[in-house]
């Protein structure tokens, strides 16, 4: 029983250390895939549902991580301005005319 606890703890530590150099998108995709696979296996009780759950969970996790980073749908060729007071770049959204920082926060 003690060796199972050590195995679980060491596996958890190894899994957490593997995520150390990941971006939020990659970390969320991996977490989403794991949760999706577990959910698919519990709900469907067969391997096909677990694989589908992993794919859907990974895609959803990647999207949430990408939104967290503020780079989903980002345009590389937009004109950006530098705010010396805050040390951050900002841009104007051509559709709404509003100003935003690079990460999507509204510019004052």
Image (cartoon, grey):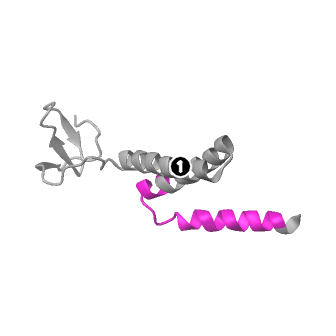
For disc 1, the marked residue is: 52
Q: Position of residue 77 (x, y in %)?
A: 12, 53
**Considering the numbered disc 1 on the image, is that residue within a helix, a strand or a loop?**
helix
Q: Position of residue 30 (x, y in %)?
A: 51, 56
Task: Classify the position of the N terminus by image quarter.
Answer: bottom right
> Farthest residue in the right direction?
1
| Magenta highlight range | 4-28
Q: Is residue 51 left or right of residue 93?
A: right
Crowd tier of the residue under label 1, counting other residues whose Cα lies within 10 Å: few below 14, some 14–19, many 20 or above: some
Q: Position of residue 92 (x, y in %)?
A: 14, 39
Residue at image position (16%, 30%) is 96
Q: Is residue 27 left or right of residue 89?
A: right
Determine if the magenta segment contains residue 9: yes
Determine whether 15 is above or below 28 in the image: below
Predominant SS of the magenta segment:
helix
Q: Position of residue 74 (x, y in %)?
A: 24, 49
> Farthest residue in the top direction?
96
Determine whether 16 is above or below 104 in the image: below
Q: Is residue 91 left or right of residue 2?
A: left
Residue at image position (42%, 49%) is 65
Residue at image position (47%, 54%) is 29
Front residue of 60/56: it is 56
Residue at image position (44%, 58%) is 26
Determine whether 4 is above or below 25 in the image: below
Task: Classify the position of the C terminus by image quarter.
Answer: top left
Determine if the magenta segment contains residue 56: no
Quarter of the image where one finds residue 97? top left
Front residue of 108/64: it is 64
Could you tell me how many numbered marks the image carries? 1
């Amino acid at each position: 029983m003690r060796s199972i606890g050590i195995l679980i703890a060491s596996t958890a530590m190894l899994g957490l250390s593997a995520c150390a150099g990941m971006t939020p998108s990659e970390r969320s995709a991996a977490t989403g895939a794991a949760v999706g696979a577990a959910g698919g296996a519990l709900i469907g009780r067969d391997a096909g549902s677990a694989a589908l759950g992993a794919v859907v969970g990974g895609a959803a996790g990647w999207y949430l991580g990408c939104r967290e980073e503020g780079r989903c749908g980002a345009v590389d060729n937009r004109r950006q301005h530098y705010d010396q007071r805050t040390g951050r770049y900002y841009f104007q959204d051509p559709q709404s005319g509003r100003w935003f920082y690079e990460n999507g926060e509204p510019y004052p």
